[in-house]
Image (spheres, rainbow, N blue to C red):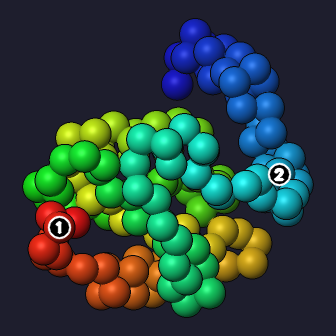
């Protein structure tokens, strides 16, 4: 790695991701309680939002309001199994619903309570329980 690249990496580590700048800081961040996973109120004003439990974890369904569902998607928010879903994720989900997409949003377990293997079971169960075809109302 060049000296310039090394300097940029150090700068970014110190300023952009200070909570993950060392293994100890990252572990401390992961141990802290997670934030709320509730969708923002603005999403519920624009779309039909419902929640169900899948394997003891929340799975949200976001449906477009006032338009026919044309397709479906499962939205996995990312976060490297350490970060909860954020307002930016919910904004992306809303944009999908704006385009007529039924969006299933399974919230999978995060560290340290869960391992990286846990999401597979949660997502598989959420997909199996999700309706694959719109019902008579187009949903």
Residue 2, visible in the rendered structure: yes
Residue 118, visible in the rendered structure: no
The residue that disc 2 covers is 29
Residue 103 percent coordinates (x, y): 33, 59
Judge by depth and name the residue closer to the eye, 12 or 134. Answer: 134
The residue that disc 1 covers is 137
Residue 63, placed above or below residue 46: below
Q: Residue at x 13, y 74 (%)?
A: 136
SS label for mark 1? loop
Left or right? Give the position of 2 relative to 38: left
Judge by depth and name the residue closer to the eye, 133 or 67. Answer: 67
In terms of sequence position, does the residue under pointer 2 or pointer 1 come before the other?
Answer: 2
SS label for mark 2? helix
Q: From the image, state whether disc 2 or disc 1 is nearer to you.
A: 1
Name the disc covering residue 38, or none: none
- Crowding at dot 1, Cα within 10 Å, few <14 / some 14-19 / many 20+, comes out as few
Left or right? Give the position of 133 relative to 26: left
């Amino acid at each position: 790695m060049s000296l310039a690249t090394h300097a940029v990496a150090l700068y970014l580590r110190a300023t952009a991701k200070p909570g993950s700048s060392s293994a100890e800081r990252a572990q401390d961040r992961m141990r802290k309680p997670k934030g709320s996973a509730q969708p923002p109120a603005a999403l519920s004003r624009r779309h039909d939002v419902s929640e169900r439990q899948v394997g003891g974890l929340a799975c949200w369904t976001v449906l477009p309001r006032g338009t026919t569902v044309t397709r479906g998607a499962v939205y996995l928010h990312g976060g490297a199994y350490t970060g909860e879903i954020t307002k930016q994720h919910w904004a992306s989900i809303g944009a999908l619903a704006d385009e007529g997409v039924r969006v299933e949003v399974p919230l999978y377990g995060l560290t340290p309570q869960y391992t990286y293997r846990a999401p597979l079971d949660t997502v598989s169960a959420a997909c199996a329980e999700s309706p694959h075809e719109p019902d008579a109302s187009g949903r």
